[in-house]
Amino acid sequence: MSLRFALLALLTSRPMTGYDVSKQFSQSVAHVWHAPDSQIYPELNRMERDGLLESAVVPWGKKGTKKEYAVTEAGIAAFREWMDSPIEIRRQREPAYLKAAYLEWAEPGAARTELEQFRDHWTEHLAMLEATRATLVDRSHPTLASRLEHYDASQWDRIVRYKIFAYDGLIDQARAAVAWAERGLVLVDELEGSTVE
Amino acid sequence: MSLRFALLALLTSRPMTGYDVSKQFSQSVAHVWHAPDSQIYPELNRMERDGLLESAVVPWGKKGTKKEYAVTEAGIAAFREWMDSPIEIRRQREPAYLKAAYLEWAEPGAARTELEQFRDHWTEHLAMLEATRATLVDRSHPTLASRLEHYDASQWDRIVRYKIFAYDGLIDQARAAVAWAERGLVLVDELEGSTVE
DNA sequence: ACAAACTACCTATCTCTATAGTTAGTGGCA
DNA sequence: TGCCACTAACTATAGAGATAGGTAGTTTGT
């Protein structure tokens, strides 16, 4: 159900076409709630059906058209209601940690590759998060910029700081993941011998 | 697909009935890969059908019977293969961080409750992880104990240290989550005023 | 004039998960 | 003897999510 609210969150910044949503999504909300466009388009339709969005058909080129979605009053109300309701706690589901617990079954080489991949993935993810955080700090993030336009300048700091706070949390998680993988590599070397086969 | 390997991991420690599996699961593998028993029973059946497990019917009381599952050679091979294959990277899906990014939409009271709940959940989870870690360190963890029986004593340290390593990673994540929520509460107080309504 | 890349919007299918049940035997205790 | 908690093993169903496509128009560069 969170996808719906992730989409509402994005669309509160400005009206967008489905295509815009799917592009902007991957640069912002997806850092916190990933979804492919095959999930986004049908969900936008359902949200329109449920009255949370309304759409306007906009011409595009000579023959083409596109559909621009805007959040309705009901959409805003639903979003606020979700914001004020208790969070769902996510269950643990971490294949990497599952594997780590049974690393005695792996080939030493595979264990190393595993941990290196994990470390590299999170290092990359961390860099992306830090880059995005920087665009929030200097307010150059495109979605943030259009979002701030609806607000009085006195509110800007408050809005931006919550977004930075969220990214800080993600960055902490990413850093912890990288540090953990690095300790894992040291451990594998110690337990399996340091020869790379 | 990871549920299958989580179950294999557990069953490599000793043969168990479905009921045992679902009980032991929640005290060990579930810390890393949660699953309810309504998923466990059908998956055990499928795994038997696929030749990864074999079952023996054991009498229980006068009329009752139970089915004890043991990992087959094919099951061991599948588990090793999975251990040596690259990990699937999980997509971000964190409703708590999603909400945090849009906290300007929440009532100040709701924002606080939210963060307190998140902090409390992770504090509790952290305590459980630390308690479990301690049972690994002193080797009193029941599943670990039966697991070690199949191995030469020279291997024990290696096996235990990988499990501790996995828990250390989970503990780091939990600690980061708690610290983040606490910073969030300070931020809410600063931005929304410290009066609790 | 044409290709390639991009915009736009889906569909189909399968698997995974969550939630909420059901049915039946066992063991203890009041 | 009856009740209750526990052991045992599911089933049913709906919704979420992953993966892999498809179709059609537009813009840009050569």
Image: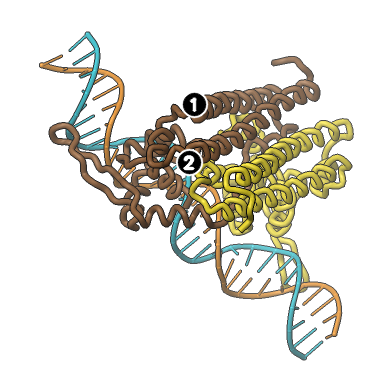
Chain colours: A brown, B yellow, C orange, D cyan
* The C terminus of chain B, quarter of image: bottom right
- Mark 1 residue type: Asp
Residue under the point 60% across and 34% down: A168
In terms of depth relative to the viewer, which is nearer, A62 or A79? A79
Residue depicted at 66% across the width and 34% down the height: B80
Which residue is disc 2 drawn over?
A155
Residue B90 in view of the camera: no
Give the class, few, some or many, for how many residues have Cα within 10 Å of label 2's Cα (few <14, many ≥20): few
Residue A138's label in the rendered image is 1
Pointer 2 indicates a residue of which chain? A
Residues beneath discs 2 and 1 located on the same chain: yes
Classify residue B98 as left or right of residue B182: left
Please state which of residues B42 and D13 is positioned toward the viewer in this rendering: D13
Q: Secondary structure at mark 2?
A: helix
Indicate which disc, 2 or 1, sits on the residue closer to the N terminus: 1
Residue A44 horizontal/vertical position (percent):
35, 48
Residue A23 appears left or right of B124: left
Residue type, label 2 = Gln
Q: CA distance from mark 2 to mark 1?
A: 16 Å
Residue D14 in the image: state x and y as whole percent. Answer: 44, 61
Which residue is rendered at x = 63% and y = 53% of the image?
A: B195
- Residue A18, percent across and down? 32, 41
Foreground label between 2 and 1: 2
Structural crowding at the residue carrying mark 1, measured as other residues with C-alpha within 10 Å and reported as few (<14), some (14–19) or many (≥20): few
Task: Work out whether residue B99 or residue B132 is closer to the camera in this orientation and state it.
Answer: B99
Q: Determine the chain carrying the residue at label 1.
A: A
* Quadrant position of the N terminus of chain B in the picture: top right
Image: B116 above or below A132: below
Residue at disc 1, secondary structure: loop
Marking on residue A45: none
Can I make out residue A161 in this image? yes
Q: Is residue A80 above or below residue A121?
A: below
